[in-house]
Amino acid sequence: MLKAHEKSHEDTAQLMAEIGRKARAAARPLAVASAERKHAALIGMAEAILRRQDEILDANAIDVKNGEEAGLSGSFMDRLKLKAGRIRDMADGIRAIAELRDPVGEVIAAWDRPNGLHIERVRTPLGVIGVIYESRPNVTADAGALCLKAGNPVILRGGSDSLNSSLAIHACLVEGLKSANLPEDAIQLVPVADRAAVGEMLKGLSGNLDVIIPRGGRSLVERVQNDARVPVFAHLEGICHLYIDKSAELAMAVGIAVNAKMRRTGICGAAETLLVDRAVASTHLVPVLEALRKAGCEIHADEDVLAAFSDAKPATDADWVTEYLDAIISVKLVDGVSGAIEHIETFSSHHTEAIVAEDAKAVERFFNEIDSAILLHNASTQFADGGEFGMGAEIGIATGKMHARGPVGVEQLTSFKYRVRGNGQLRP
């Protein structure tokens, strides 16, 4: 496997312009492709990924070795490394997307006017989508498959640390496109590590890019949001909160807290702050924190929590606005659901928040007064995932309020147009 990240290109701008032109040329044939043809392409991709598993693992081994030599963090390496099980999950994810209802052409709403006009609002592809992501090679498969299902050409720009893995996965996606006689340029992967490629995408590739979706750390997303000249679907950080109410069942609270933080610490849906109702500090706080410590979690606690649980570090102001992406959690006692709402609305990144409670009124207040993309009741924040929502997969979580919010799946990758049918009507 060629170490693609060592390639050099004299004119990255020219390369990206050509990629943009090819993507735009693929847009129309893809937008009108039948559901059956897209389904066949996706199944072909999944089969190619399984058939070429060894090639993907060999490519990933190069990226992993380079990452270890570069001293990448443990959480970063966890996101980078592929195993046979993760490759099967990748293929299964594509198959799940294939089986979703095709959104293109779906009539969202229809109505008749008094003058006899019949009006329909119909789903259409968004256009050419650019996805910029970092170390997760599985995003190559997820993003390529989702964009295809929604009828959108996509330009994938993965991180240099995972470029060999992404190239091997991308070859499988192209194989699926070929097998269904769809344009190979419908899914393109930027084949160079030059950061100037990102700059060209942010400029819009001469009008050939319609939407950008960044998926990665704060610096990447911040740059995209600040510099992009095209619309962006993104979340800057996943500062997710878990609130344990005085009405919470203790065993449930313990289980959810450990899962929300420790199942996978490096994902954007991992809980970063635990809020506990002061009314149950004497019964719920210590059992929950002991379970977290036993699972290997470092606890940063406010003064009230430290008084009850000494095996913790004092929390600083920075803790409440930190996305750890690691086995660390900040903990605070609050005055009931009102205190939880106040803290969350002050410090949240508006990604995902959860409440553990049996009191229906507390849950309704939590749901009604917190303005985050995803709210959960008696469930782990780690369910903040398009696959868990039944979307097959997702490109990311959007926390903005324009067009897409929450998991960005197939439906969120469409726009709409109006079809108006008449029988000779003239406007007076």
Image (spheres, helix red, strand yellow):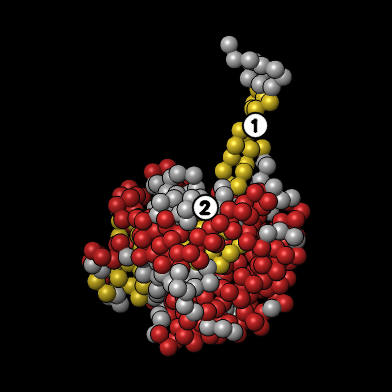
- Circle 1 sits on which residue? 419
Label 1, residues with CA under 10 Å away: few <14, some 14-19, many ≥20: few
Residue 276: in sight, yes or no? no
Q: In this view, does 113 lie to the left or right of 399?
A: right
Q: Residue at x 66, y 83 (%)?
A: 54
Residue 74: percent from the left, percent from the top? 43, 80
Q: Residue at x 53, y 55 (%)?
A: 129
Question: Which secondary structure, mark 1?
Answer: strand
* Image mark for residue 394: none
Measured as percent of width and height from the top left, residue 9 is found at 47, 74
Q: In the rendered view, does 74 fall on the left or right side of 45?
A: left
Of 292 and 413, which appears nearest the observer? 413
Per the rendering, the mark at residue 208 is: 2
Residue 37, given in percent of the width and then of the height, sits at 75, 55
Q: Callout 1, which amino acid?
A: Arg
Residue 82 image point, x, y percent: 57, 79
User: At label 2, which amino acid type do we have?
Assistant: Asn
Residue 257, quarter of picture:
bottom left
Q: Is residue 35 above or below residue 10?
A: above
Above or below, 426 against 230 in this view is above
User: Badge 2: how crowded within 10 Å, few (<14), some, or many (20+)?
Assistant: many
User: Could you say which is closer to the camera, residue 100 or residue 312?
Assistant: 100
Task: Determine the residue positioned at 62% across, 42% down.
Answer: 123
Image quadrant containing the C terminus: top right
Residue displayed at 45% across by 44% down: 402
**Cα gap from disc 2 to disc 1, whole angstroms:** 25 Å
Quarter of the image where the N terminus is located: bottom right
Asked which secondary structure carries label 2, the reply is: loop
Indicate left or right for 20 with 400 as reference: right
In this rendered view, identify the residue nearer to me: 203 or 175: 203
Q: How many labels does the image show?
A: 2
